[in-house]
Amino acid sequence: MKKVTSILAVAVMALGMATYVVENTASEFDFMNDISKALSCSDCSTETPPRGKTMIS
């Protein structure tokens, strides 16, 4: 009975760790995606100032 409990505990711990790693990996990819979006400039040719400020002519 102790062996079954021990094996079950290790299996549950391994599942929890795998879930944790998958969640962290997913959030890391989201973070990298946000960084790449911030670094890419899709509207650099427009004359609209950043953050909605008005331009002084």
Image: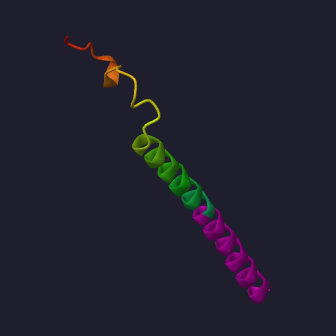
Q: Position of residue 22 (x, y in %)?
A: 62, 62
Assess whether residue 15 is covered by the magenta stretch: yes
Residue at image position (79%, 84%) is 4
Q: Residue at x 69, y 76 (%)?
A: 9
Q: Residue at x 66, y 74 (%)?
A: 14
- Residue 14 higher or lower than 53, as above or below: below
Give the image's coloring scheme.
Answer: rainbow
The foreground one among 10 and 33 is 33
Q: Main secondary structure of the magenta part?
A: helix
Q: Is residue 48 above or below residue 5?
A: above
Q: Quadrant of the C terminus?
A: top left
Left or right of 36 on screen, residue 21: right
Q: Quadrant of residue 23?
A: bottom right
Residues drawn in magenta? 1-21
Q: Nearer the viewer, residue 41 or 27?
A: 41
Tell me where residue 47 appears, x and y as whole percent: 34, 20
Residue 50, percent from left and from top: 32, 25
Q: Is residue 6 magenta?
A: yes
